[in-house]
Amino acid sequence: MLTIPQIISVAKLSQVITDDKLAKSGLFNSPKIDPSLPFLIYRVRKSVEWMYGKDPNYPTLRQVANYLYSICPYSAQALAIINNGGSPITPTTPTIIKSPIPIFGSDFATATAWNGQNSDSISIRSTYTLQVFWNDIQRFLQEGTEWNRTSSGIEIINNGTTITGFDALTNPDYSLYIYISL
Amino acid sequence: MALNPSFALSQILGIDNTLVVTDTSTGSDVLVVSRRVSLQIDTGGYLVPSGNPSSQYISWALADTSISLAVLNQDYAIQVTVDWLDAGGSALYTSTTLTDTTQYLEQEAFNLVESESSDPSILQDDNYLMNALRLRKNIDDANIAVSMWGNITVSQSALNRGTYLVQNANCFF
């Protein structure tokens, strides 16, 4: 048997569901619902709430609460909502990723490997999609032939044709832009 | 240390004519030697117990944490003021709140629901259901008028309409 607070919760939901069904019943030719039913549920629920607040052990309160439960249609649906309801979520501040981010030769770990070091403190996750713009030659580099993705950044490929002699250790002023997408 | 004045109001189930005022103040002030309560209604008049020496104030001894005021012959919207007094009778601290008592009407509303639970066939009477809804609406209107709008007159009007229903229950229910 439901507790009186549970019955009150069911009644609140049942009233709302009944109101909704009532509003739609005329549109969709559904089974007719007594238009006074939400009001009846409301006034009985208010009386049960009042007496429960005054004296939870009032002799006839259980009888009246059971009556309230009996007049609540869609109580099964209401109970399902109550039992499966979640808890409030505290929204978190979204992380905004700056893109593109500038990097320099001095940010490289080796002559060709950049492991995510940047002055904007952006953490380069392995799930991010990157594009590399080499500012010194004013174009995007071709992934697969001129650079490869690593778990933490990129590796420049000295392919001997389009990229030759790339060495970030001796060229700390190299200027590149990393474009980041999720 | 100064007194931080406050009080709480309540009604006891089954004693509809009584309003209980409880002192919930914090701190203390040695200059405070007594208290007094005033209950002003929408007409500008005051509710006092029969035989009260004053037509406005009800004395409240400092030794008593709460005082029961048997002043309600029906439900009222009331501006309740409590003064903490010095030896000369001047108010050193004052606290005021606007409230409404609804126990008469709420008890009747519950009685109706109680009867319905034993015999729901009464709900087939449209007049009964409409008047029962009117009673509930009057209670809600009275509460909202004071809690949201601070309107003592509107609240009392709703309480009076509800009281009329209750006092003529044999006609309406």
Image: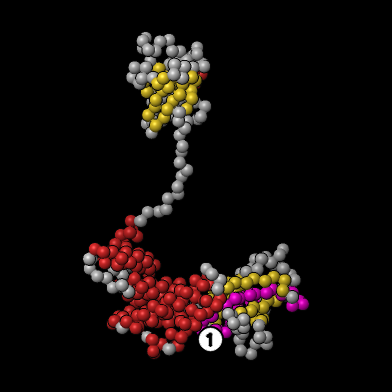
Q: Residue at x 50, y 30 (%)?
A: A121
Q: Identify the image quadrant of the C terminus of chain B.
A: bottom left
**Is A80 located above or below residue A126 in the figure?**
below
Q: Residue furthest right?
A: B88
Q: Residue at x 46, y 44 (%)?
A: A92
**Is B160 located above or below residue A23 in the figure?**
below
Q: Secondary structure at mark 1?
A: loop
On the image, the x and y values in percent for residue B73 come to 53, 86
Magenta region includes residue B70: yes
Choose between A100 and B39: the one closer to the eye: A100
Q: Is residue B137 left or right of residue B66?
A: left
The subunit letter for the residue under badge 1 reads: B
Q: Is residue A55 left or right of residue A144?
A: right
On the image, the x and y values in percent for residue A53 come to 45, 72
Bounds of the magenta segment: B63-89
- State the residue position of label 1: B73
